[in-house]
Amino acid sequence: MPADTVPTTQAEDDARALHDDGHKIAPGEIAIGVVIGRTSEFFDFFVYAIASVLVFPKLVFPYLDPLTGTLWSFAIFALAFVARPVGTLIFTAVDQAYGRGAKLTIALFLLGGSTAAIAFLPSYESVGIASALLLALLRMGQGVALGGSWDGLASLLALNAPENKRGWYAMIPQLGAPLGLIVASLLFLFLIDSLPAADFLAWGWRYPFFVAFAINVVALFARLRIVVTPEYARLFENRALQPAPLNETVRSEWRVIAAGAFAPLASFAMFHMVTVFPLSWVFLFTEDSPTRFLVIEAVAAAVGVGAIIVSGLLADRLGRRTVLGFTAAAIAAFSGFAPQLLDAGEVGESAFMLLGFVLLGLSFGQASGALSSSFSQRHRYTGSALTSDLAWLFGAGFAPLAALWLSSNFGLLAAGAYLLSGAIGTLVALWLNRELGKAIG
């Protein structure tokens, strides 16, 4: 439906009135909106992930041993990734009926509301098993909202980037991941360091979820400022970034969707191997304090920011397919020795995290929007959203659960084998999909 015929909200009308100045849209302006949106989403992601290790096993599963409680916590963690495609289905219909601005407003308030509600989660001691059921429900609410929060800006950025800067602009959305991790890690670090353990577990852990809600509200208005203005509405239409029925998109574009979902497996498996999983291993199986590891994690994430930026420079010089292929091979090599470093004390943990974030940044930096131009115009917007959902589901959704279960039963080398499988998946996808190679080369 054309942008000027759908119903609008007051927030959209205000944004249009404030910013309807007829200026030419620059890729840098789109990039700002992308980074703000992605950072807010990843902050939510990491607040929940850290709580899954440090809080929920004790709060929700105190009747289980720490390892089993963490595994159950990671199982609930995965529900958001299962629910994301459902969110895309629901909010595609909202987008078609009411427009992108209304969709984004509803989705981000659902995300913020679900996140803030977790801050009020009662303990098992208060309500029994209902605590776990409520947590699962709210986690699925986050997943549905994440599916609906797709705004098309990453695809718009990729399509409007200069021909010789595609790799550079492709890495920009990925900066949100390490930036969100840095803020979440430092916030938890401050609370753990400032409060007695009993107070942190009773109420201190809840504050990051309130902060996440506030950041979501700020991100909502920052993104609305972009997506609902007339200049962007016309640009979305000119680039054919309009919603299409999901079933029609899958029937027509399933090959491109499959390629896009499996090509970044190495990056997404690596994502959780150096963010969520190591915190759980160190917390459960070593004597190291979580505060010290959160410092290591924040420093390594800062290194990851630099590596993501470098990935853009390398991709424009060597080709995105080449960068993805070489980094997948490097991740395969990393999987053979690096996980054991987590049992080698502070020096080993630091080496694992720093080297891991370098490889993650180089690979993850080029894992966004690679196939936007491969979709037909009619299905580009919906196809890109669904591809993102499936890539996260297959590549990352169950990674913390699988890695912790494998390593606790068969040793850290088994977690490396899991990571190796993701690297092999990427290499096979790059080798089999010639269209993919042309699209990102």
Image (cartoon, helix red, strand yellow):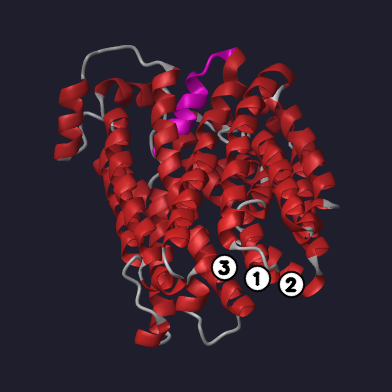
Secondary structure character of the magenta stretch overall: helix
Identity of the amino acid at label 3?
Phe
Residue 391 seen anywhere in this rendered image of the structure: no
Of the numbered discs 1 and 2, the one sitting upstream in the chain is: 1
Identify the residue at image location x=71%, y=17%.
317
| Front position in the image: 267 or 424 | 267
Determine which of the numbered discs, if any, sits on residue 284 in the image: 1
Q: CA distance from mark 1 to mark 2?
A: 10 Å
- Circle 3 is placed at which residue position? 74
Secondary structure of the residue carrying numbered label 2: helix
Please report the bounds of the magenta region as a residue range. 151-163
Residue 339 on image: x %, y %:
78, 56
Residue density around tag 2, few if under 14, some if 14–19, many if 20 or more, within 10 Å: some
Side of 348 relative to 248 (left or right): right
Of the numbered discs 1 and 3, the one sitting upstream in the chain is: 3
Residue 390, placed above or below residue 407:
above
Residue 245 on image: x %, y %:
41, 46
Secondary structure of the residue carrying numbered label 3: helix
Identity of the amino acid at label 1?
Leu
**Quadrant in which the N terminus is drawn:** top left
Q: Using the rendered view, name the quadrant where residue 78 is placed.
A: bottom right
Residue 27 seen anywhere in this rendered image of the structure: yes
Identify the residue at image location x=74%, y=49%.
352
Residue 30 on image: x %, y %:
41, 25
Assess whether residue 337 is covered by the magenta stretch: no
Q: Using the rendered view, name the quadrant where residue 103 is placed.
A: top left
**Quadrant in which the C terminus is drawn:** top right
